[in-house]
């Protein structure tokens, strides 16, 4: 068995990326869950390199800060002036102790590169004991890229940059992908001999190949199976193209594992997301960050989930969630907003125009309509009436509301925290709950209704309302009762009802306590 090679990965990330026209360094632009640099680092990760060096320059502080988050073991090395890719690698190697082995160099802007491809390049290089191996690809449009120039026997002769190429060389469609494996010792030697005698006056890493070849060292080309992997990113149009290509790759992979994507073209899933079998993702949906979707869950249409965990068989429709947890079989939306630490237990419901933040909603509990729940704990099987607000902020501090299990709170309640509503308690519609409601009690906190008879006819004479009121009055006095039943029946129900009745029946009148708040 040969000795395992010491492996060093060098990522080139010092360039500005002028054509991005951005204050953000190019390699930090995001692409479906990772930065361009993050993608490159994760493509190299399975190599298990003994050390990873990232050459930083433009926006060095930002790139270093990002590295400390995503690849704390990588060593940033500063290239203060961008004097070329050869210069960049020279500086990188000066920062790591001498030694034999393989140096893998990757341009920082090839985010679609697959780990398998890097692995195959390095294996081919090490098995052939080559001095240098370049990853090449046949592309439809080689504009702007370095060309692979081969001799009559098809062996690599040199790599020529487009701006230094003659017409024959420019016609070559086999390009340098900007990913290489080198024998460390021979690379160091060749880097010392690089000239700046080229159109840009830079030290070109690619010239190492011509130099080694002239010295009779074995150099090789490894051709990528899929040229798409080698696409670089130089401006935002290319970034958008890469995003579409990566989206298709990610989506296809999920469909092959048993996830249904009803409209893959409008489904954008970060590389960091996980979905379980039989999950169904409907159109126009974005799944981002550390989002996890359980088996059989239904997500979409029109949903954005960021760092959100959705349990099996749950459903989320036309909603936005950040840092939330949706339990098994729970339902969210349409039109809900779940904010960080919104936690829905099994079979809980958060309905339409409901916002939840830093709150636990118990198993089977429902918050069906038009409600803000902030800093609250809601017990299992409890129902929160429509249009309620958990008043959590006094202008200085946040406070919690605790609602027990099997409670039924009336519509249009304000829970002024800190406050507690006990197990099985009720509250009346329109209540401002400032004091605790004990278990099993009915909390009523609103003014009693007073009707001023005949007010409209007296104070709004001549209006349509006054005429209608007059007709209703006349009909009640003179005509058979059936005529005016509709109008007077409705008001009658309201005025006859006790506070308790009104508390729970928010819409209809006869369908039984509490139900109307949830339908
Ligand atoms: C380079 C190759 C070209 C290849 C192409 C693939 C050279 C001379 N040319 O060209 O053959 O087809 O990549 O995309 O290498 N960088 C530094 N320091 C520098 C210069 C560059 O860190 O001084 C970094 C850049 O940030 C970038 C990478 O090296 O990540 C490539 O540099 P870039 O200027 O984009 O090279 P290309 O002209 O695209
Ligand atoms: Ca480039």
Image (cartoon, grey):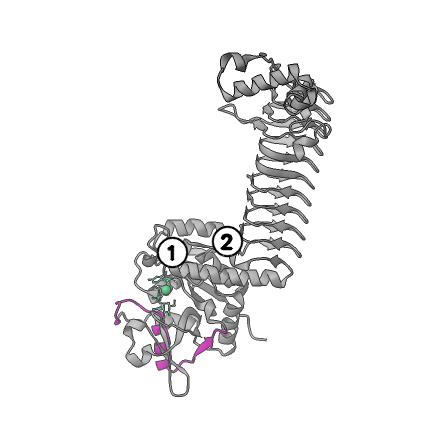
Q: Is residue 309 above or below residue 411?
A: below
Tell which circle, 1 or 2, labels the residue nearer the N-terminal end.
1
Where in the figure is residue 353, as x and y percent of width and height?
56, 37
Toward which corner of the image does residue 208 lie, by quadrant? bottom left
The local secondary structure at tag 1 comes to helix
The structure residue drawn at horizontal position 68% and vertical position 31%, both measured from the top left corner, is: 516
Toward which corner of the image does residue 54 lie, by quadrant? bottom left
Q: Which mark is residue 33?
A: 2
Toward which corner of the image does residue 143 lie, by quadrant? bottom left
Q: In this figure, which residue is indicated by the disc labeled 1? A: 26
Q: Quadrant of the N terminus?
A: bottom right
- Crowdedness of circle 2 by 10 Å Cα count: few (<14), some, many (20+)? some
> Magenta includes 474?
no
Where in the figure is residue 291, as x and y percent of width and height?
58, 49
> Magenta includes 215?
yes
Q: Is residue 103 visible?
A: no
Q: Residue extending furthest front?
A: 479
In this view, the residue in front, 482 or 393, is 482
Q: Is residue 230 above or below residue 284?
A: below
Q: Is mark 1 within 8 Å of ligand 1?
A: yes
Q: Quadrant of the C terminus?
A: top right
Q: Which residues are magenta?
A: 197-225
In this view, the residue in front, 147 or 202, is 147
Q: Is residue 314 above or below residue 470?
A: below
């Amino acid at each position: 068995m040969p000795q395992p090679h010491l492996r060093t990965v060098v990522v080139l990330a010092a360039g500005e990326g002028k054509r991005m026209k951005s204050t953000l360094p190019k390699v930090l632009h995001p692409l479906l869950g990772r930065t361009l640099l993050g993608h490159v680092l994760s493509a190299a990760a399975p190599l298990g390199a003994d050390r990873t060096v990232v050459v930083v320059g433009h926006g060095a502080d930002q790139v270093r800060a990002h590295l400390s988050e995503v690849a704390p073991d990588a060593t940033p090395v500063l290239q203060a002036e961008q004097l070329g890719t050869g210069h960049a690698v020279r500086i990188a190697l000066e920062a790591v102790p001498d030694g034999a082995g393989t140096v893998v160099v990757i341009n920082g802007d090839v985010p679609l590169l697959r780990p398998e491809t890097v692995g195959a390049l390095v294996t081919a290089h090490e098995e052939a004991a080559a001095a240098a191996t370049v990853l090449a690809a046949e592309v439809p449009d080689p504009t702007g890229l370095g060309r692979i120039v081969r001799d009559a026997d098809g062996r690599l002769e040199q790599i020529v940059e487009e701006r230094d190429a003659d017409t024959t060389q420019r016609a070559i469609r086999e390009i340098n992908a900007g990913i290489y494996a080198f024998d460390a010792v021979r690379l160091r030697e060749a880097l010392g001999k690089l000239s700046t005698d080229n159109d840009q006056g830079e030290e070109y890493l690619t010239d190492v190949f011509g130099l080694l070849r002239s010295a009779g060292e074995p150099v090789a080309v490894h051709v990528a199976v899929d040229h798409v992997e080698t696409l670089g990113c130089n401006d935002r149009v290319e970034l958008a193209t890469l995003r579409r290509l990566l989206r298709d790759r990610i989506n296809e992979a999920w469909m092959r594992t048993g996830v249904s994507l009803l409209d893959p073209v409008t489904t954008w899933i970060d590389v960091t997301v996980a979905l379980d079998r039989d999950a169904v993702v409907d159109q126009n949906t974005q799944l981002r960050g550390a989002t996890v979707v359980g088996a059989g869950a239904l997500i979409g249409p029109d949903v954005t989930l960021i760092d959100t965990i959705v349990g099996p068989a749950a459903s989320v429709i036309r909603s936005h969630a950040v840092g939330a947890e949706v339990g098994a079989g729970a339902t969210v939306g349409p039109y809900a907003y779940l904010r960080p630490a919104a936690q829905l237990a099994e079979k809980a419901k958060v309905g339409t125009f409901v916002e939840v933040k830093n709150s636990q909603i118990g198993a089977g509990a429902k918050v069906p309509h038009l409600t803000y729940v902030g800093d609250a704990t809601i017990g299992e099987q409890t129902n929160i009436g429509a249009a309620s607000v958990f008043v959590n902020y006094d202008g200085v501090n946040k406070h919690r509301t605790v609602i027990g299990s099997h409670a039924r709170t009336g519509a249009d309640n304000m829970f002024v925290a800190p406050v507690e509503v006990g197990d099985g308690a009720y509250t009346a519609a329109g209540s401002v709950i400032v004091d605790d409601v004990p278990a099993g009690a009915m909390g009523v906190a609103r003014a009693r209704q007073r009707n001023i008879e005949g007010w409209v006819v007296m104070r709004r004479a001549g209006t349509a309302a006054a005429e209608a009121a007059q007709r209703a009055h006349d009909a009640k006095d003179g005509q058979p009762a059936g005529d005016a039943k509709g109008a007077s029946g409705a008001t009658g129900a309201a005025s006859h009802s006790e506070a308790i009745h009104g508390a729970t029946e928010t819409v209809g009148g006869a369908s039984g306590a509490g139900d109307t708040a949830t339908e």
